[in-house]
């Protein structure tokens, strides 16, 4: 069976885990945590970056930092993972779901403005498959209406957006805040893990306090205050040094990991083009302003029935392909809270999109051969 995902070990993980274990500093915010955070800040021009226990936790920190309260509204695509919404629902927000773009599962940027009103506080673009949303449009709306932008960059490590001035900017460096995931299904992993990027300078001091359970402990350790205490809300958002040590081994090999995934992605694309055209199946479209970080290889079928048949046959033939995201506006938890608008593109991706296996040690030839043996 070709699995859907297989976490890749670079070979240095055990070494750094041992080093962390022997260092005597096992809790968070130590040597490896700082090394990982600096890596991102330097390489991508991110604002202050904080490792977290997950992307979910990073999104929860973002909701606290934006001071989202009961009655506030948050705009995001319906076609996303539950954590994008849950983080804000926990603060009492109402989620206003936008439809997906016709050409890609990310948010339809032109559908956002009509959803903004005086209660709107945050826009959350999700860079689905690591493919950028049109951030110029989204940041312009944020400026016009005074809103926060939180990038859900869970899938978007090493992905870029070229803005209207031709400047190439890393995803996660554009919004006021951004959240990344290092879950084992993502390009770079520590098993469970994440990171909050705080680009907005006004939010950086408070982010550190929320991260440290509502205390000014970090300032105390830097010698900036002579005692530390409870000064704000917060929670336990830091991962241990054990997780950070594992993550560091992955980051050191980021380029090799990305090259390999990109080879797989390109092989899929070239190997399946003709079959997809013949079967009326859509391959991923990468807009001009975006790059592709080979996080995911997805295809979009003509119908739910076609997708069901393909997935069944693939699984019978030893390839674990999957679909995902029931649009959150149709979910058992939120459908009664949703305002009833129909989101046809989101529904289409829910019904018709599927994902092929994608991981470092993958043999794409095998998967391609099995797919093109199917005729439609
Ligand atoms: C994976 C993912 C998350 C959640 O990440 P965790 O690290 O598992 O909390 C959130 N949003 C999107 C779009 C994701 O793909």
Image (cartoon, rainbow, N blue to C red):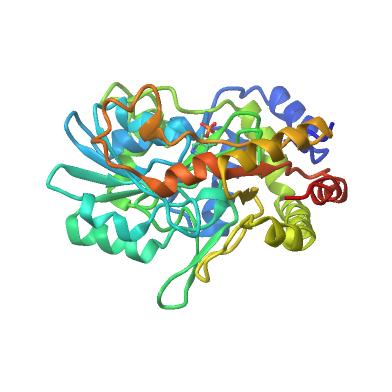
Q: Is residue 239 visible?
A: yes
In this rendering, position of residue 368 left or right of residue 219: right
Residue positioned most to the front: 376
Place of residue 10 in the rendered image (x, y in percent of width and height, measured from the top left): 80, 41
Residue positioned most to the left: 118
Given residues 286 and 136, the one toward you in this image is 286
Place of residue 22 in the rendered image (x, y in percent of width and height, measured from the top left): 73, 23
Given residues 373 and 179, the one toward you in this image is 373
**306 shown above or below 16:** below
Residue positioned most to the bottom: 165
Q: How many circles with numbers are drawn on the protein?
A: 0
**182 shown above or below 286:** above
> Looking at the rendering, in which quadrant would you find the N terminus?
top right
Given residues 133 and 178, the one toward you in this image is 133
In this rendering, position of residue 174 left or right of residue 375: left
Q: Is residue 220 visible?
A: no
Place of residue 63 in the rendered image (x, y in percent of width and height, measured from the top left): 32, 35
| Residue drawn 49% across the image and 28% down it | 238
Given residues 117 and 179, the one toward you in this image is 117
The image quadrant that residue 247 belongs to is top right
In this rendering, position of residue 208 left or right of residue 5: left
Place of residue 217 in the rendered image (x, y in percent of width and height, measured from the top left): 39, 28
| Residue drawn 22% across the image and 39% down it | 73
| Residue drawn 56% across the image and 36% down it | 324
**157 shown above or below 134:** above
**376 shown above or below 168:** above
């Amino acid at each position: 069976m070709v699995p859907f995902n297989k976490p890749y070990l670079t070979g240095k993980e055990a070494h750094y885990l041992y080093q962390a274990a022997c260092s005597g500093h096992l809790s968070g915010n130590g040597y490896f945590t700082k090394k990982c955070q600096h890596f991102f800040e330097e390489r991508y021009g991110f604002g202050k970056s904080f490792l977290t226990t997950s992307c979910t936790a990073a999104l929860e920190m973002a909701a606290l930092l934006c001071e989202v309260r009961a009655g506030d509204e948050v705009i995001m695509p319906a076609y996303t993972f539950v954590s994008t919404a849950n983080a804000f629902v926990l603060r009492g927000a109402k989620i206003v779901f936008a439809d997906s773009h016709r050409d890609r599962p990310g948010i339809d940027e032109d559908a956002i403005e009509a959803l903004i009103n005086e209660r709107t506080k945050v826009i959350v673009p999700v860079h689905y498959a690591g493919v950028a949303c049109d951030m110029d449009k989204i940041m312009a709306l944020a400026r016009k209406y005074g809103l926060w932008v939180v990038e859900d960059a869970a899938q978007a490590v090493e992905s870029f957006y070229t803005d209207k001035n031709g400047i190439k900017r890393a995803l996660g460096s554009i919004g006021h805040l951004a959240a990344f995931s290092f879950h084992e299904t993502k390009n770079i992993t520590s098993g469970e893990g994440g990171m909050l990027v705080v680009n907005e300078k006004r939010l950086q001091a408070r982010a550190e306090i929320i991260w440290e359970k509502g205390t000014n402990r970090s300032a105390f350790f830097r010698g900036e205050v002579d005692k530390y205490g409870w000064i704000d809300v917060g929670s336990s958002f830091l991962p241990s040094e054990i997780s950070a040590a594992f993550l560091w081994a992955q980051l050191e090999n980021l380029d090799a990991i990305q090259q390999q995934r990109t080879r797989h992605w390109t092989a899929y694309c070239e190997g399946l083009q003709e079959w997809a055209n013949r079967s009326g199946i859509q391959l991923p479209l990468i807009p001009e302003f975006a790059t592709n970080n080979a996080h995911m290889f997805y295809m979009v079928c003509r119908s739910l029935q076609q997708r069901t048949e393909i997935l069944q046959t693939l699984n019978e033939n030893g390839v674990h392909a999957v679909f995902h995201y029931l649009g959150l506006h149709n979910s058992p938890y939120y459908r009664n809270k949703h305002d009833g608008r129909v989101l046809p593109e989101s529904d289409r991706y829910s019904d018709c999109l599927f994902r092929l296996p994608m991981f470092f040690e993958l043999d794409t030839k095998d998967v391609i051969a099995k797919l093109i043996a199917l005729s439609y």
